[in-house]
Image (cartoon, rainbow, N blue to C red):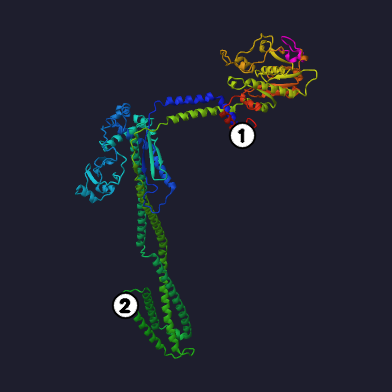
Amino acid sequence: MDWTRIIRVLQRNLPLLIGVPLVLIIIVRILRKDVSEKYESETTIYTGIASGLTLDPDRNYNVFATNNMFDNMINIIKSREVAAETSLRLFTQNLMLEKSVSEYISEENYKNLQQTTPEYIKKLIHQKIEPSTKGSHINSKPSDTIYLKNEDFIFQNQLFHKVKPEETILFLAKQYGVSVSELMNNNQLTSYSLTPGHTLFIKNIAKDTTGKMDLVFDTIGLLKPGIDQDKFEKNFKIIWEYAFANDTNYLYRLLNSDDPFYSIKTIQSVTVRRVQNSDLINIKYTSTDPGICRQTLLVLTDVFINRYKTVNENRSDAVVKYFTDEVNKAAMRLRNAEDQLLEFNKTNNIINYYEQSKAVADMKEKLDQEYNNAMVKFEASAAVLNRLEEKLSIQGQIQLKTDQIIDTRNKLSDITSKITITEVYNDPNPKNRAKLAELKAESERLKKQLEEYVNQLYSYTNTIDGLPLDNLLEEWLTNVIVYEESRATMQVLSNRIKDFFEYYKTFAPLGSTQKRIEREIGVAEEEYLSLLQSLNSSKLRQQNIELASNIKALDAPYFPLKPMKSKEFLIYIIAAAFGFFFVAFIIIALELLDNTIRTPERLEELARLRLAGVFPRIQKRYTIYNLPFITNRLIELIIYNIKLNTRDNVKHGGPIILLLFSPSKKEGKTFIGARIAEKLREFGEKTAFLTFVRSSAKDENQWLFASQPETSNPIDSTDDLRKTQGRSTKKVKNKPKSSKTLNNIIPLPSPNEDNFKYLIDSHFPEIHSLNEMNFIDSQPIFNQYKNIIIEIPGIIFNPYPIDIVTQADLGFMVVRANRTWKKSDALALFNMTKLLKEKPIAILNGVEIEALETVLGELPRPRSRIRRFVKKMFYFQLGEKSLLT
């Protein structure tokens, strides 16, 4: 669909496009007649999220974390709990008033509140207050009393605080940033104890260069002078508990209703946004009451600040408490592991296991070395001694068997063993040392005695081998001493090694046990240090959260003096635009979804026939066009196409038979056929027009025949012309005749004697020639006509004579533009095409007059310069000229 078609479709429905927006404007006006004027106030809160102070030096700016924190703040402000608390605080405050004050609530809304609130709800309020304008503005004179939250107030630039139960002087000093001594001196206190209810002077409040007091804490949660903070909080607590006691009470229904002031939905309608990329949050609220508008923002801001602090502090406190408990548990586990190691060392006499094990290993190695050396000496001395005793032979054996020598040798051996044992253990005891000296002296004595006994035997000068006996005995004695000493040493060392093996069995497993205990201590220590570090980090984060939670209100909500500019005119424009575009959309959608033939192009596409011509739909709104000229020219074009298609089939000496048919009835065949016949007669060609009547309707189409009484206007009503064009007349009401009816604009064909009507009966399909047709008035002489136009009934629902169809030189089908093309139409046309000599041509009847431009070009009608310019613009014909200049 091109722009031209769209404009034409909209132009045809212009009354609807204008009427619907007007109706919507009227409806909007009716709906908004009771809409009150609205007031707007706003406040700005400083958060310090992005650029505020922090205790973490390694903290980096994170845009995602910052945006997340701002989103959290905005969601808290618009949360249901904050809205509910704000609503109930505002409700409690307004209900406690004795009369209305414009700064808090208008008189009308106050009366409405008193009338709609049940008496049992009013009885929940314990105190009625008389509001005062005193202290209602922050920027008062320095001499005024400014009442702040928590019952603090400023008088003559001095800050005072009312002591509450469980408050200490240390707590107040930390809260207000002053020293304890300063508080005691300012209030002449002699002890640290405070009396609840006593008013303390805190400090002087400085002024900035603008003359405004520089308050160091939040002043947004203002209460009106005369309201007792404790009583107000008690009343609010009662209202809160009652509202959420069940879901059927008045207050709960009020919160969840559409009340314009006290519903959650209304409070949540605040507009919250971050001011560009700063640390500021802007909150706007709109209401029909300027006092409630400002008070709502005051209460909402105070509730939000308290909620935000509570959420952050509770969250950080929970984390700190968790890590504190875990650190204590880890410290207990570490202490238990260390105590276990201490008890283990006590039980097993361990001073330093690793040093002790090293000393034991060294001693074991030394004993093994000494044992090996003693074994070497023992084996060597035994071998030498055996050799010497063999050389001494019998005499040596006799001498050795001497009782004295043997006894002395045995004693020497015992003493030597004792000396060796004493030296190995190296006992530092003086008694043992003295005993060792005695043993050594006794050993020397026995050696000398044994030497004397041996010398007595030295009297033998020679051995049995002739060797000197002196040297041999001396050598034997020496080896005997070495042999006995090494044997004693080996025995002692062997026992000592056995003792070490027993000690190893006990000492070796202690190492793995001690390592296991030490690993437990290491794990417990690492866990303790890790948790301790996490605790320190959580405490640091807690301090950061406390700093970040210290948000302030920079701009207090102002009292709106003037209502907002009304958007009523804009709403009317939107309603009208919506109505216009919605209707236009529906019209265009219906046009796009319309499956009717409508245009010549669609008929050629659907019927697959060449177009012979079109004929417009005749309506009064088309009187701006030169309809007589247009219709006359269209008939001429149809005749031209008929001539063009029949020039090769002209019968010499016989008439040209033109078959006029349509798929169904009321397509406008009679009207089109009569106009063609009339135009052919004007061209000088004698033409007969044969139309049909049924046996039940013999008077049909009487306007075509000369037997009808003559009249200048055979048809004087729009209904008659609608019939001739094949359009329904059911919805056309009888209207009084006007001086300019449609048939005056487009006159019907005049009655003519060459128009004949034949009767359709049961034998009609069986006729074989034109002479067999049952004419009603007179029988035409066909040879005298050049053209014979035969109209037959609709070919879908009526039988037709096949022989007559086959004799036709040309068939042309008339189809209405406001109907759809069905498969039945295509099938009927297919059968008709098989009977005709040539493929028929099509005539589209009743098209919208704008569609004629595809046939005639620009239609003649009066146009303004603007209309011509717009049309050229849509057709991209701005360079087109009407004349060759």
Q: Name the one closer to the observer, 693 or 860.
A: 860
Q: Is residue 485 left or right of residue 200?
A: right
Residue 409: x and y, percent?
A: 39, 81
Q: Is residue 777 magenta?
A: yes
Which stretch is magenta?
A: 758-780
Residue 72: x and y, percent?
A: 40, 42
Determine the image quadrant of residue 291: top left
Q: Name the one closer to the observer, 206 or 386.
A: 206
Could you say which disc has been placed on residue 434 in the image?
Answer: 2
Q: Dividing the image into 4 quarters, which one contains the N terminus?
A: top right
Tell me if I can see residue 798 in this picture. Answer: no
Residue behind mark 1: 879
Circle 1 SS class: loop
Residue 22: x and y, percent?
A: 48, 25
Circle 2 SS class: helix
Q: Residue at x 27, y 33 (%)?
A: 131
At label 1, which amino acid type do we have? Gly
- Give neighbour class at mark 1: few <14, some 14-19, many 20+ (Cα, 10 Å): few
